Structure formats: C-alpha cells, structure tokens
Image (spheres, rainbow, N blue to C red):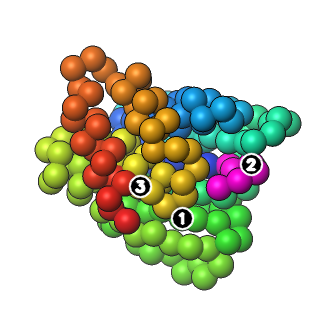
C-alpha cells in the first residue's frame, strides 16, 4: 500500500493487540517509512475492550490518531460492531471466523480463522496477534515480510521466537 494507511486492530484485552500494533509500527520504521502507534483498552484490561492504532506513511504524519481506518482487524464481535463504522469506504475488514460477517458492501471483507489457526496449528491462543499480523500483511502488503518478521522477533519474549515465527507464517498463508 502506498501513501498513508491507517490501521485499527481491535478485540479484547489479553489478545496481544497492543503488542501487535507496536510490532507493525516498528516494521514500518525498519522499511524506512514513518509510523505512529497509539492504544487504548478498557479498565478491565484482560477481557475488556482493546484497540491499537497504527498510521504508516511514506511522508510526514500530521495527526497521530486514526480517524477513518483503511484496514480494520476485529477479533471479537463486540469490537467489529463498535468500530465497523470507522472503516473507510473501499477499506479492508479482516474478521475472525467466529465474528458475524457484517452487511457492508462497500468494503472488502476477509473472514479468516485467526484464533483457530493459533489454537489448532500452533497450540496456543496467545499467538493469535502474530497470526493476525501475518494475515494483515498477506492481504495488504503494508510492510515488507522481512521487516515484519524482524520486528516480531525483536519484540516477542525470549524463548518464544520459533513459535511466533510459525504463527506469523500461519497468518501469511491464511489467505
């Protein structure tokens, strides 16, 4: 994707979306682009609402908040319902397979088994955020595959590099 792209990653606390946003922003920097990342989560933290926003641009970023996103990831029904209206016309909606497909016809919708791949193919739901990053990049090519892999491996806890690399590859191949 060229120009400026606004991405919103949404779900519930504990799904690792804040870390995913940080990783995506770092991958953009590795690629020589400008990026900014912001986040918010409910007071409940684990289980409450959570979102991370990333703006990636080939030029200067003038405003640090996502207004209307080009890409929306929703891992829960609640987050999809809450943020769907913030997705631009002709935007990309990536939803987990357990999220009901919305009636919007003016966006591209990718209904993918993100959490299922993390649980069944990797064996741990905690890597759903990394599977999601792979899926997002497989669909959008927003950053290079190499930069995203490098950013993932720099940010995941020591000793989990192999499982996270596998999760990333599962996401890339989900599409």
Label 1 or label 3, whichever comes before in sequence order: 1
- Disc 1 vs disc 3: Cβ atoms closer than 8 Å? no
Distance from label 1 to label 2 (Cα)? 17 Å
Element carrying mark 2: strand
Q: Is residue 137 visible?
A: yes
Report the quarter where the C terminus lies. Answer: bottom left
Query: Alpha carbon of mark 1 to alpha carbon of mark 3: how far?
Result: 11 Å
Q: Quadrant of residue 92?
A: bottom right
Q: Earlier in the sequence, mark 2 or mark 3?
A: 2
Q: Is residue 100 left or right of residue 9?
A: left
Image position, residue 171 (x, y; %): 34, 53
Q: For residue 83, which quarter of the picture? A: bottom right
The alpha-carbon separation of the residues under discs 2 and 3 comes to 20 Å
Q: Residues within 10 Å of mark 1 (few under 14, many from 20)?
A: many
Residue in view at x 21 percent, y 20 percent: 159
Residue numbers of the magenta segment? 1-6
State the image coordinates of residue 173 (x, y, percent, origin top left).
32, 59
Residue designated by label 3: 135
Nearer to us in this view, 73 or 1: 1
Which quadrant of the figure contains the N terminus? Answer: bottom right
Residue at image coords 30%, 48%: 169
Indicate the position of residue 52 as horizontal and vertical percent values: 56, 39
Residue at numbered disc 1: 93
């Amino acid at each position: 994707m060229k120009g400026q792209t606004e991405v919103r990653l949404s779900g519930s606390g504990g799904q690792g979306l804040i870390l995913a946003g940080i990783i995506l922003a770092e991958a953009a920097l590795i690629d020589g682009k400008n990026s900014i990342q912001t986040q918010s989560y409910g007071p409940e933290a684990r289980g409450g609402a959570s979102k991370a926003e990333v703006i990636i641009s080939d030029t200067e970023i003038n405003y640090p908040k996502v207004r209307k996103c080009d890409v929306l990831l929703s891992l829960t029904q609640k987050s999809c319902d809450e943020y769907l209206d913030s997705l631009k016309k002709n935007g990309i909606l990536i939803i987990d397979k357990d999220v009901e497909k919305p009636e919007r016809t003016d966006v591209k919708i990718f209904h993918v088994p993100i959490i299922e791949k993390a649980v069944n193919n990797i064996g741990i739901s905690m890597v759903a955020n990394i599977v999601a990053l792979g899926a997002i990049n497989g669909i959008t090519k927003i950053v290079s595959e190499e930069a995203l892999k490098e950013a993932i491996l720099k940010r995941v806890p020591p000793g989990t590099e192999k499982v996270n690399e596998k999760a990333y590859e599962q996401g890339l191949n989900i599409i």
